[in-house]
């Protein structure tokens, strides 16, 4: 195996994935985002190729673009 492809020496260029949120944490974030959207008279628009959690939030707040 070449040195470049040696998994022992390979440095992963991205930070580790964050720890998943609990359902309670997700609900708190959703409530906070909804409140901010109302306060700012704003909408969250998500296209079909957006991260599924962002799409779900956009659907939950009433706006999605397909």
Image: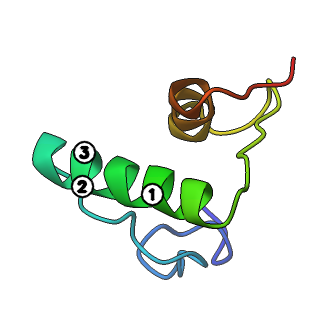
**Sequence-first tag of 2 and 1:** 2
Q: Tell me the CA gap for discs 2 and 1.
A: 11 Å
- Disc 3 target residue: 27
Residue 35, numbered circle? 1
Query: Local crowd at mark 2 within 10 Å, few (<14), some, or many (≥20)?
Result: few
Residue extending furthest toward the right: 66
Residue 42 point in image, percent of width and height: 73, 55
Which residue is label 2 attached to?
A: 28
Label 1 Cα crowd, 10 Å radius (few <14 / some 14-19 / many 20+) = few
Q: Quadrant of residue 4?
A: bottom right
Q: Position of residue 23 (x, y in %)?
A: 16, 41
Q: Nearer the viewer, residue 2 or 18?
A: 18
Secondary structure of the residue carrying tag 2 is helix
Q: In this view of the protein, which residue sits in the foreground, 26 or 7?
A: 26
Query: Does 4 sit left or right of 66 as displayed?
Result: left
Mark 3 and mark 2: span between their CA atoms? 4 Å
Please report contact status of discs 3 and 2: CB closer than 8 Å, yes or no: yes
Figure colour scheme: rainbow
Disc 3 or disc 1, which is closer to the eye? Answer: 1
x 24%, y 45%: residue: 27
* Residue 36, horizontal then vertical, whole percent: 52, 64
Q: Earlier in the sequence, mark 3 or mark 1?
A: 3
Q: Which mark is residue 49?
A: none
């Amino acid at each position: 195996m070449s040195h470049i492809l040696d998994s022992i020496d390979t440095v992963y260029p991205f930070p580790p994935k964050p720890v998943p949120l609990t359902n309670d944490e997700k609900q708190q974030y959703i409530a906070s985002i909804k409140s901010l959207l109302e306060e700012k008279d704003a909408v969250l628009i998500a296209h079909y190729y957006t991260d599924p959690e962002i799409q779900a939030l956009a659907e939950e707040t009433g706006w999605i673009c397909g």
